[in-house]
Amino acid sequence: MRAASTPFNRDQKLIIFVLIMCQFTMVLDFMVMAPLGPIIMPFFQINPKSFSILISSYAFCAVISSFTVSFIIDRFDRKTFLVLNYIGFLLGTLTCALAQSFEVLLLGRMIAGIFGGVIASMVPTIVGDQFSEETRGLVIGYTQISFGICQVAGLPIGLYFSNLWNWHAPFLMVLALGMILLPVIILKIVPMKTHLQNSHKKDRLLEFFKMIKTKRNQLGLFCTLLLTFGAYLLMPFTSTYNVNNLKMDVHLLPLFYLFTGISVILFAPLLGKLSDRVGKLKIFVFGALFASLVVVAYVRMNEASFGALCLVNILTFVGFFSMLISFQSFMTTLPPFEHRGGYMALNASVQQLGGGLAVLAAGLIIDKDQVGKLYHFSTLGYLLILVLMVCIFIVRKIDHVINLNSGEGPL
């Protein structure tokens, strides 16, 4: 289906900007933990398993919070929910910025995860509420620019200041940006209550459970679990692997993320537009196969130049964002309008569970020697490829179920 070319109105443009910035601050808060591994592990004198707990604690707390709010989120104004949870997220980030012990840092990650998990579910929910199905792929592509901005500006600047001062600096930067964004959300974003038009239904909760029991929605949640598990398998130790195994200079990490971020900014909207025009299923399958080929090449490297590592990282991101953008756009079409918030919150809970399990699994599989060299990293890569092949099968199954039940054409 060819996507509509209708321009977004002023309110929609503001919503896109706010969603990009909300995701940017959350992504930076979460993603900065992995590249800080070479600094935080010796600072607290912890091993990879303890470091993986720091990262996964965010995800597991997000699982609990997203699951809990899935039953009530559709009964409230989207804006109000966003503001309250963003305040909580900033409090968690403040705790990380002030942490002087492993335990306090762990507490900060947990608080940030509790509220960040809910916000993560609200981004696709708001996109589904405020934008037509023909343009959701493009809008989700725009929201994924936040990852690119994080790579271009957030991570390099944060890592630069962490090298200049200490590892607390990136969290202080997130906090400062969040304090600027919060008044914009409160003062400029209009209330979003259109989903409340059927709130008078007495059987609303019963209808929500009935919606979850449908085969395509269950398959969607299961695929979310596997896809996120695969996406996070390599992430926690990529920087450490590049530095300690492939001999990248640790001071080149900011430049490494800069190049990757530029590619995300350039490719994410394009991939979203292709998802709308070419078809979500086709783009998803392409991304899974392409990412698998790149990962095979990556984990078989013994030593690589800085340019080669940048290229591999960029190509990996192209593959994964092809899958993530097309799949997220697809997921907004599965639930009915009045239950979209609850379903996407449940989806976010499953998503965070997959990420948390992946980080824990990576921590259990990976080991290191006395000089910091990692072992069994290739095992993670091959496990990732297996997961992606299963995801292709499930997404094709969902497509078949939708076509069988509705008689509609391809995704």
Image: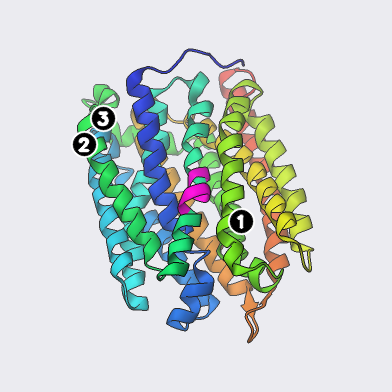
Q: Is residue 410 left or right of residue 289?
A: left
Q: Nearer the viewer, residue 285 or 19?
A: 19
Q: Earlier in the sequence, mark 3 or mark 1?
A: 3
The residue most toward the bottom is 370
Q: Main secondary structure of the magenta part?
A: helix
Q: Amino acid at mark 1?
A: Phe
Q: Nearer the viewer, residue 257 or 66?
A: 257
Q: Where is mark 1, residue-wise? A: 256
Is the residue marked by circle 1 packed among few (<14), some (14-19), or many (20+) residues within 10 Å? many
Find residue 273 and report its image quarter: top right
Q: Amino acid at mark 3?
A: Ile
- Front disc: 3 or 1: 1
Secondary structure under tag 3 reads loop
Secondary structure under tag 2 reads helix
Find residue 282 and report its image quarter: top right
Q: Where is mark 2, residue-wise? A: 186
Residue visible at 63% across and 87% down in the picture: 370
Distance (Cα) linking label 2 and label 3: 6 Å
Q: Nearer the viewer, residue 341 or 112?
A: 112
The x, y position of residue 104, in whole percent, is: 31, 73
Highlighted range, magenta? 148-154
Q: Are marks 2 and 3 in contact (CB under 8 Å)?
A: yes
Q: Please identify the quadrant where the C terminus is shown.
A: top right
The x, y position of residue 54, in whole percent, is: 43, 69
Whether residue 257 appears in magenta in the rendering, the answer is no
